[in-house]
Each structure stands twice: as structure tokens, then as C-alpha cells.
């Protein structure tokens, strides 16, 4: 898996009162008002189609499911997933509404993995996350969670974006990010905001290549990052989803949530003048200046009321015209499941990432052989397909002179066309 704050006070808000048959018309009016307020606040694109939502509300039926805390992960759980990048599907990007039928049963897994949850006390960084009762880990670090009867909260992680730049960091989210809620019903709308605080480093502890572009770096003694995360959740559809695997076990009643997140990053340096925001001074540069800005991510998450795995998670591009990736519950009895930390150790990694002029793909865990590196833009269009022979120096260096700024997906295949690794690459200019 999957790898997501300023100093103002944050809050988590419930933007919609509960619906009931007794006050349906009153609640409907409130829903319409909330939709317009959220549209203005979050500046969502495309804007919610209120007419479609009204029609869906009128036609809603009592057989829609309610998702509860019985689906929250607990210690000892192994959640099994399969993932496909650039699947070339659009039939799952349907308008809001009830009684729908989605079918992705034809997809072929590019990779499979398990996410294992353990008692938080078993984690190496347990002392840094007060209240945590669960931890999961992979090759990038650890993630800590807190569960209750109503929420499954993400407290923070080790690793993150700085890990790819060679910096050890602990991200603590204030307040925690609510990953799952209970109960959840059709038409629920939630909004939350969180910050990463205390993400500061002495300049002497950072690699020289990261700080070389900082103006007046000789006068700087420390640096800090401010990260703000905002999330809008709209549970806009329900129906039946069919995923790969034997039937009828692989057909589920589901509730679909649309998750739109905005992650904004700023950088400050400390000198004898105090803290100074330098986010714009090096815009478009390399090193730490590859991080500032706002990233938008749109996902559709499909939940069942009994299964702990999300039945599917569909990531789309920013204009929501193409599917970037699909992760789904793996019901296959023949596909081998790899522990996520084990599999990620064999996945190629790009450095630096974000990259500016060049990028190097580290393939050192792989056996010697001929591999094919493919790169796709965020719309799913293949823009590069090159073969490489990896022997002693198992790395691939790529000049990015012809690449435009943006987010890309890179994929490495072996001679049998089996996916060895699939990950994101961010290019800044």
C-alpha cells in the first residue's frame, strides 16, 4: 500500500444531521444546503449534481446496507488485497444513486499483498503514539491506529514522503485522521481537517543535496515542514459489486464513499530572524523544494457491512475521467499472498521522488535478467516502454528532460510480463 499540516486549529465536523422517515423533507432541505456550502468551501471539481442526488434520495430503498464497527480491523487480522494499475475501466465511475450494479470481475491482479494488524505495543515507535492500540508495517515504516465503537483513527506513521529523500521522520496527525466510521449510511457527508506538527530538523542532520537550494543556507540552523490535510467524504451510492473470484462469494452488497483529499505542504527555515516561510522561493526546484504545494487525491471506497477488507478502492485522476488504480479484496484460492512488507522489499523504488531532471530506479533486490519499464501519465496513457538488462548494477537511470511536471505511474515487468513493482513518480519542473 498503501503511501497522506499548518499551525491553525483543526477540527472534525459532521456536516449533516441523520435522516429519518419522520423528517425526510426537512432533512432533504438540509442536505441540499450542506452540498452547496461544501461546494463553496472545498471548491470541488466537478461540482456535485444536486438533481441526481435528489433523484437518488427519492428512489432509495430499505435494502441498502449500514456499515458498522464490526468491519474495523482488530489485532491479528490479515486483510488480503489484489491491485491493478491503469485497468482501463470506467464502468465503476457511475453517478450517485441507489440500487446500482458494478462489475470488475474481469480484472487480473497485478500484485497481491496482506496488511497485517498487530497490537500497537509490538511496534518499534509505540511510545510516540499515545492511545494507539494497533500497528501495521511495511518496508517504508509503521502506521499506528486507535479504534473505538464509532471510529477507526489513523494516528500517524514513520517514513512518509521524507523517507524517499533519505530523512527519518515521524508524522503525527492532530487530530487523528478518521479512516472509518460507525455507523455509515447512504447520504452521509463528513468533513475533517488535520495537521502534522513538530516535523522539524536541525540543518546539520539533513543530507546536503536536500538543502543545497535553500537561499542563505549558511545562516539557517533548522528547518520545519507544515502539512495540512483536508478530507471530504460523501457516501453517494449503494448497490452490488462483483469482484474477481468464485461466485457467489465474490459478489457483495456495498456502500460507496467518495473521498476527496487535499494535502498542502509548506517549508520554513529558522535563522536569527526567527522562522521564515520559504515555500515559494524555490518553487519548482529539487530537494525539499519538490514537496511544497497542494496535492489532490480522489478515491471511491466500496464497503460491505460484514467484511473487514474494503471490497474495492478505486483511485481516479483529478478530473475524474480515468481510473488510475483498483485495489480489491482478494478472494482467490490460488493466487499466493505476500506479506506487504515482504513484497514491498522486492518493489523498485525511485529516487529522488519527487524528481526534477533525472530519476534512478533501484532494482537491487531483483535477480539478473531482462525487464521492461513502463511509465503512464495520470490519465493512464503509456508514455514510455523500454527494455533494460539488469546484471551487476541493478538500477535504471532516466533523464526527465522530456517529461512534463505531474504525477506518473511506473511499472516494471519481468520477461514473463509479471508485474514486479508498481508505484508513483512525481515530476516537478
Image (cartoon, helix red, strand yellow):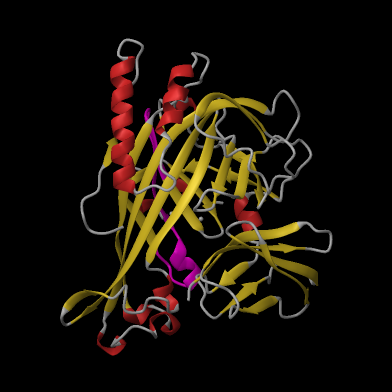
Image location of residue 396, percent across then percent down: 68, 76
Which residue: 79% across, 63% down?
414
Image vertical order of residue 232 relative to residue 365, above or below: above
Q: Is residue 179 in sight in this rendering?
A: no
The answer to which of 163 and 120 lies nearer the viewer is 163
Image location of residue 202, percent across then percent down: 31, 76
Q: Is residue 244 in sight in this rendering?
A: yes
The answer to which of 409 and 371 lies nearer the viewer is 409
Image location of residue 417, percent across then percent down: 80, 58
Which residue: 48% across, 76% down?
429
Q: Residue furthest right?
A: 416
Which residue: 34% across, 19% down?
19
Image vertical order of residue 266 relative to residue 187, above or below: below
Quadrant housing residue 226? bottom left
Query: Magenta stretch: residue 134 in it?
Result: no
Q: Residue furthest front?
A: 51
Image vertical order of residue 95 relative to residue 56, above or below: below
In this picture, residue 212 sits left or right of residue 341 = left
Segment colored magenta: 145-169
Which residue: 30% across, 14% down?
23
Amino acid at each position: 500500500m498503501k503511501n497522506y499540516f499548518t499551525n491553525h486549529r483543526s477540527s472534525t465536523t459532521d456536516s449533516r444531521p441523520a435522516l429519518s422517515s419522520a423528517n425526510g423533507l426537512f432533512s432533504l432541505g438540509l442536505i441540499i444546503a450542506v452540498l452547496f456550502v461544501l461546494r463553496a468551501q472545498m471548491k470541488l471539481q466537478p461540482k456535485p449534481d444536486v438533481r441526481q442526488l435528489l433523484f437518488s434520495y427519492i428512489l432509495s430503498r430499505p435494502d441498502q446496507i449500514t456499515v458498522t464497527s464490526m468491519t474495523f480491523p482488530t489485532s491479528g487480522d490479515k486483510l488480503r488485497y489484489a491491485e491493478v494499475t491503469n485497468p482501463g475501466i470506467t464502468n465503476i465511475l457511475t453517478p450517485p444513486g441507489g440500487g446500482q450494479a458494478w462489475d470488475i470481475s474481469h480484472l487480473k491482479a497485478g500484485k497481491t499483498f496482506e496488511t497485517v494488524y498487530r497490537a500497537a505495543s509490538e511496534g518499534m515507535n509505540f511510545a510516540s503514539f499515545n492511545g494507539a492500540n494497533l500497528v501495521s508495517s511495511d518496508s517504508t515504516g509503521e502506521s499506528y491506529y486507535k479504534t473505538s465503537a464509532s471510529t477507526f483513527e489513523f494516528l500517524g506513521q514513520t517514513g512518509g514522503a521524507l523517507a524517499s529523500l533519505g530523512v527519518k521522520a515521524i508524522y503525527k496527525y492532530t487530530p487523528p485522521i478518521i479512516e472509518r466510521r460507525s455507523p455509515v449510511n447512504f447520504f452521509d457527508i463528513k468533513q475533517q481537517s488535520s495537521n502534522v506538527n513538530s516535523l522539524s530538523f536541525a540543518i546539520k542532520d539533513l543530507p546536503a543535496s536536500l538543502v543545497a537550494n535553500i537561499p542563505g543556507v549558511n545562516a539557517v540552523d533548522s528547518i520545519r515542514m507544515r502539512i495540512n490535510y483536508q478530507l471530504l467524504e460523501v457516501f453517494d451510492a449503494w448497490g452490488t459489486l462483483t469482484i474477481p473470484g468464485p461466485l457467489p462469494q465474490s459478489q457483495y452488497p456495498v456502500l460507496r464513499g467518495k473521498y476527496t483529499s487535499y494535502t498542502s505542504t509548506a517549508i520554513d527555515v529558522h535563522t536569527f530572524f526567527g522562522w521564515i516561510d520559504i515555500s515559494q522561493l524555490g518553487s519548482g526546484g529539487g530537494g525539499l523544494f519538490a514537496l511544497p504545494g497542494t496535492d489532490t487525491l480522489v478515491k471511491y471506497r466500496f464497503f460491505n457491512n460484514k467484511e473487514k477488507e474494503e471490497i474495492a478502492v478505486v483511485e481516479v485522476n483529478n478530473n475524474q475521467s480515468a481510473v488510475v488504480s483498483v485495489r480489491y479484496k482478494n478472494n482467490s484460492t490460488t493466487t499466493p499472498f505476500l506479506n506487504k512488507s515482504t513484497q514491498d522489499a522486492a518493489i523498485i523504488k525511485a529516487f529522488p521522488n519527487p524528481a526534477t531532471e533525472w530519476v534512478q530506479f533501484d532494482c537491487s533486490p531483483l535477480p539478473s535478467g531482462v525487464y521492461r519499464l513502463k511509465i503512464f501519465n495520470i490519465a493512464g496513457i503509456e508514455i514510455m516502454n523500454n527494455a533494460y538488462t539488469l546484471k551487476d548494477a541493478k538500477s535504471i537511470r532516466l533523464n526527465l528532460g522530456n517529461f512534463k511536471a505531474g504525477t506518473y505511474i511506473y511499472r516494471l515487468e519481468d520477461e514473463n510480463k509479471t508485474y514486479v513493482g508498481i508505484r508513483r513518480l512525481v515530476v516537478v519542473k
